[in-house]
Image: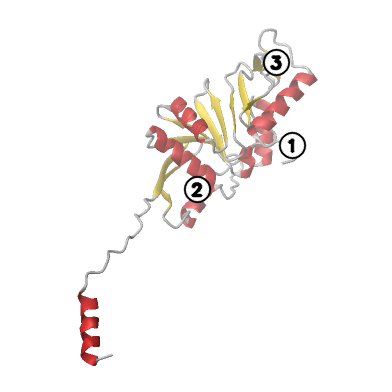
Amino acid sequence: MDRRLFLALAGASLAAPQPARAWPAPVPLRRLNLVNVHTGETFDGPYRDDIGPIGVAMEDLSAFLRDHHSGEKIAIDVGVVDFLASVMDAVGATRATVLSAYRTRETNAMLARTTFGVADNSQHIYGRALDIRLRSRTEDAMQAARAMRRGGVGWYPRSGFVHIDTGPVREWTLDGRGFGNLLLFGKPSQHFHEPIDVSAAGEFVRRNTGRPLTAADRLAIHRLLDRALGLPSGR
C-alpha cells in the first residue's frame, strides 16, 4: 500500500468518533438496620456489595445473631439475610427487631419444652431462620414474604412477629388456637383445631378443659411442627 494512503487512512480512523462503551449500572449496596431484642445490640450498615456478601459484615451478623442463651454463633445463611432485606424493602421498613435467630440444639430443646410452636428440627438450628418484628406493617411484611415464595413464612399474630427461613416453601399461622392455617409446600395439610395452652408446669393442655394432651395428640402436633418449622424427615 502507498505510504501516504496508509497514513491518511490511519489518521481518519483515529479522528472518527468511537462508540460509547456501555458500562453496567452500579449495583447499590444492600444495607440492614437491625436491633437484637435480647442483647440491645444493633447492626446498621451494608452487608452485600456488587461483588457479593461482605465478609466482615457477615462475620458481624453472625455474632449479632448468635444464640443469646449460650453465646455460641454460626455462619448465618446469607439467603435468609437477603430474604429479610427484600421483605423490609417491600413494605418500606427501615429497621427490624430480631426476636430469634441462631439457636443451638440445646437452646432449641429447652424452648420446645416450654414454648408452643418450636420444632425439634427448627431451621434456627442451622442459621437459616429469623423471627422479626417491625415498627409497623408487620402483617404486610408477612404477606409480602409469602408472595416471594423464598422459603418458610410463619405468622404469629398474637405475638406480632414473622418467622422467615430459607427451607422449603411453606407457610403457617399459629395464633394460640391450634393450627388454623397450615400449608406445607403450598398444599393444605391436616389441621389440629383443638385450642391449646401451656400450663404453669410447661405442659401442653386443652384450653377448654385444662386436661393434658394425649400421647397421640402430642405426636401429631410435633410432626406438624417439624414439617412446618423444620425440614421433613429424611431431608
The picture places residue 19, in percent across and down from the top left corner, at 27, 65
Can you see residue 49?
Answer: yes
Q: Nearer the viewer, residue 68 or 149?
A: 149
Q: Residue at x 36, y 57 (%)?
A: 24
- Extreme residue in the right direction: 215
How far apart are labels 2 and 1 at the CA level? 30 Å
- Extreme residue in the bottom direction: 3
Name which of mark 2 and mark 1 comes first in the sequence. Answer: 2
**Disc 1 element:** loop
**Disc 3 element:** strand
Q: Which residue is mark 2?
A: 61
Q: Dot 2: few (<14), some (14–19), or many (≥20) neighbours within 10 Å?
A: many
In the rendered structure, are the residues bearing label 2 and label 1 in contact, judged by CB atoms less than 8 Å apart? no
| Nearest to viewer (mark 2 / mark 1) | 1
The picture places residue 74, in percent across and down from the top left corner, at 59, 49
Q: Amino acid at mark 3?
A: Val
Q: Which residue is mark 1?
A: 233
Q: Residue at x 51, y 28 (%)?
A: 161
Q: Dot 1: few (<14), some (14–19), or many (≥20) neighbours within 10 Å?
A: few
Q: Which residue is mark 3?
A: 205
Can you see residue 37?
Answer: no
Q: Is residue 102 left or right of residue 22?
A: right
Task: Identify whether 229 is placed above or below 62.
Answer: above
Q: Amino acid at mark 1?
A: Ser
Task: Identify whether 198 is placed above or below 38.
Answer: above
Task: Identify whether 153 is placed above or below 81.
Answer: above
- Extreme residue in the front direction: 1
Name which of mark 3 and mark 2 comes first in the sequence. Answer: 2
**Disc 2 element:** helix
Task: Identify whether 49 is placed above or below 98.
Answer: below
